[in-house]
Structure formats: structure tokens, C-alpha cells
């Protein structure tokens, strides 16, 4: 990867980092509000749950962006952390913070899905 390409990715990642850091600091959506009306309580709880999920997603993405910037500094940006093959330029253009090539990402996603379904099964068995 050329120095120009790396600088382009660094600029994209730094801009995304700044944006996400600002969003993650704003936690007003998770404030617990009390209401005399039960329907308002349910609505507030649903909004709070959505805000928590969004905050979790953005925090995870922020960690990935920070790690990608670190990989640029360490001169191993664009290399899959699992198989150590080069990540395709199209994938990096679409998801510049990705640590994996498409094949390794698919394996990781399948593993995560199977782990989540096993956890759900355990939860259901323990609940019975």
C-alpha cells in the first residue's frame, strides 16, 4: 500500500474517530426518567434501551477505528489479523477499520452466531 493511500485512510479514520468520540460522549439518551404514567415509563424504557444499544454499537466501532489507526502507525494496516493475507482494497474502501479479510470475517461472524445461539439455548434450558 502506498504512502498516499495510507494517508487517505488515516484521514478517513481520524474523521470517523472524531465523529464517534463526540457521539459516545453524549449519553443523554440513557438518563433514567420517572413518570407517573405507566405508558410513559414503557416508552422511556424503550427509548433508553435503543440509546444504550446505539451507544454500545458506536463504542465498539470507536474501538475498531482506534485499532485501525494503531495498525497504520505499526505499518500493518491492510493485513488480515487472522490469516495475515492482504485485505482487498474494495473491502478497505468500504470498511477501513476492518481487521479481517472477507473470508476470515465470515468465519468470525459464523462463530459469533453459533456462540450466541448456544448462549440462548443455555439460557432457555436454565430458565425451564
Image (cartoon, helix red, strand yellow):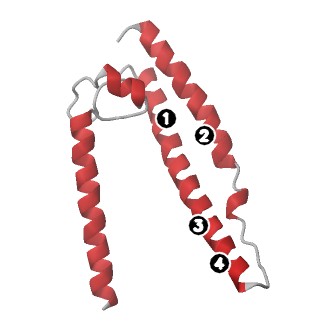
Quarter where residue 22 is shown? top right
Query: Are dots 2 and 4 in contact, CB under 8 Å?
Result: no
For the point 51% across and 51% down, which residue is it? 57
Q: Which residue is mark 4?
A: 42
Among the two numbered marks 2 and 4 on one chain, the one whose residue lies closer to the N terminus: 2
Q: Single out the mark in the foreground, 3 or 4.
A: 4
Mark 1–mark 2 Cα distance, whole angstroms, equals: 9 Å
Q: Single out the mark in the foreground, 2 or 3.
A: 3
Q: Where does residue 24 sit, x and y in percent of width and height? A: 63, 47
Q: Which residue is mark 1?
A: 65
Q: Which residue is mark 3?
A: 49
Among the two numbered marks 1 and 3 on one chain, the one whose residue lies closer to the N terminus: 3
Quadrant into which the C terminus falls: bottom left
Q: Where does residue 124 sit, x and y in percent of width and height? A: 31, 82
For the point 47% across and 20% down, which residue is it? 9
Callout 4 crowding tier (Cα within 10 Å): few <14, some 14–19, many ≥20: few
Query: Are dots 1 and 2 in contact, CB under 8 Å?
Result: yes
Q: Where does residue 63 sit, x and y in percent of width and height? A: 49, 42
Amino acid at each position: 500500500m502506498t504512502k498516499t493511500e495510507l494517508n487517505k485512510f488515516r484521514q478517513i479514520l481520524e474523521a470517523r474517530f472524531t465523529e464517534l468520540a463526540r457521539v459516545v460522549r453524549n449519553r443523554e439518551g440513557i438518563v433514567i426518567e420517572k413518570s407517573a404514567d405507566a405508558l410513559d415509563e414503557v416508552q422511556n424504557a424503550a427509548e433508553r434501551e435503543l440509546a444504550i444499544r446505539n451507544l454500545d454499537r458506536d463504542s465498539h466501532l470507536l474501538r475498531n477505528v482506534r485499532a485501525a489507526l494503531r495498525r497504520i502507525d505499526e505499518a500493518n494496516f491492510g493485513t488480515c489479523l487472522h490469516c495475515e493475507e492482504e485485505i482487498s482494497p474494495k473491502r478497505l474502501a468500504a470498511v477501513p477499520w476492518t481487521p479481517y479479510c472477507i473470508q476470515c470475517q465470515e468465519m468470525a461472524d459464523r462463530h459469533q452466531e453459533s456462540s450466541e445461539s448456544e448462549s440462548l439455548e443455555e439460557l432457555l434450558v436454565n430458565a425451564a
